[in-house]
Amino acid sequence: MAARAIWKGKLNLGRTNVPVALYSAVVDRTVRFHILDENSETRVKQHMVSPQTNKEVSNEEIQKGYQVEPGVFVILTKEELEEIQPKPSRDIEILRFVPSQNVTSLWYDRPYYLGPDGDQSSYCALTEALANQEKEGVVRWVMRGREYTGALRSQNNYLMLVTLRHAEEVVPAEALPTPEGGGLDKKELNMARQLVELLEGVFDPKEFKDEYRERVMEFIEQKAKGKKPRLHAVKSKRATPSLGAALSKSIATIKKQKKKIAA
């Protein structure tokens, strides 16, 4: 099934505009359940109810408020909220170009593909320039009433746009307690290095699956067919007494697995 564009705009490069189409790069596969009436097995409806009168509150009677202190709200009307929203635009403004390593994964939020939507030559030129110079753009744009900041990068001959979190949303590492585990002996350090070497490889996302989702969907499919599936409790791992024992056990397990594969 071909991907569908969810938004269209243009990248502003000085006097040049590159028309682009935005595509979601990820799909939410979370298993979602409906809430049903136990007796009739029909979907139940949710209503807004006032805790003071116990009566339903209609949409026309609902207003939005921000709590500034317990029990005290600043009320904002629909018109006021619309006035505060950023003005609609189809422009993706490039603020600057930075080294690719400058923006770390700590800031990443949601990835999108940017496909060409007309002028393919300008699109390809920008894609190749970013890849060759190992740069990515810091950009800003407005979509569906919200302003975004993002990282524009080249990947596999396509442009990618990753929305970035704002500074106030990111917890700095300095906020954590300082690690004090620097007193490892040589034996533990050597075992840790050996474990890293044994597990060295290439990241293949196809190897990693949502096992919980697979178990849930398999269970649902069996029940839908009228079968009574068996429940299998997930085994919990026992805690090892020390770091050295944990490393030694891990190394032995990995070596045993590799011998089976080679046999």
Image: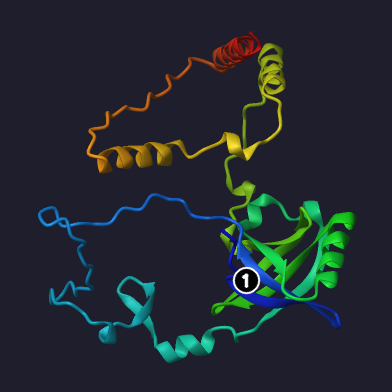
Judging depth in this view, the residue of 70 and 258 nearest the camera is 258
- In x, y percent, where is residue 150? 68, 65
Along the horizontal axis of the image, is 196 left or right of 98?
A: left
Relative vertical location of residue 207 with respect to residue 113 in this rendering, above or below: above
Relative vertical location of residue 202 with respect to residue 102 in this rendering, above or below: above
- Residue at image x 70%, y 17%? 194
Residue denoted by label 1: 148
Along the horizontal axis of the image, is 80 left or right of 16?
A: left
- Residue at image x 33%, y 83%? 63
- In x, y percent, where is residue 169? 57, 60
Secondary structure at numbered mark 1: strand
Along the horizontal axis of the image, is 163 left or right of 246?
A: right
Q: Residues within 10 Å of mark 1 (few under 14, many from 20)?
A: some
- Residue at image x 73%, y 70%? 139
Looking at the rendered image, the quarter that the C terminus falls into is top right
Judging depth in this view, the residue of 40 and 99 nearest the camera is 40
Q: Amino acid at mark 1?
A: Tyr
The colour scheme of the drawn protein is rainbow
- In x, y percent, where is residue 224? 27, 43
How many numbered discs, if any?
A: 1
Residue closest to the far left? 39
Judging depth in this view, the residue of 223 and 7 nearest the camera is 223
- In x, y percent, where is residue 79? 44, 91
Looking at the rendered image, the quarter that the N terminus falls into is bottom right
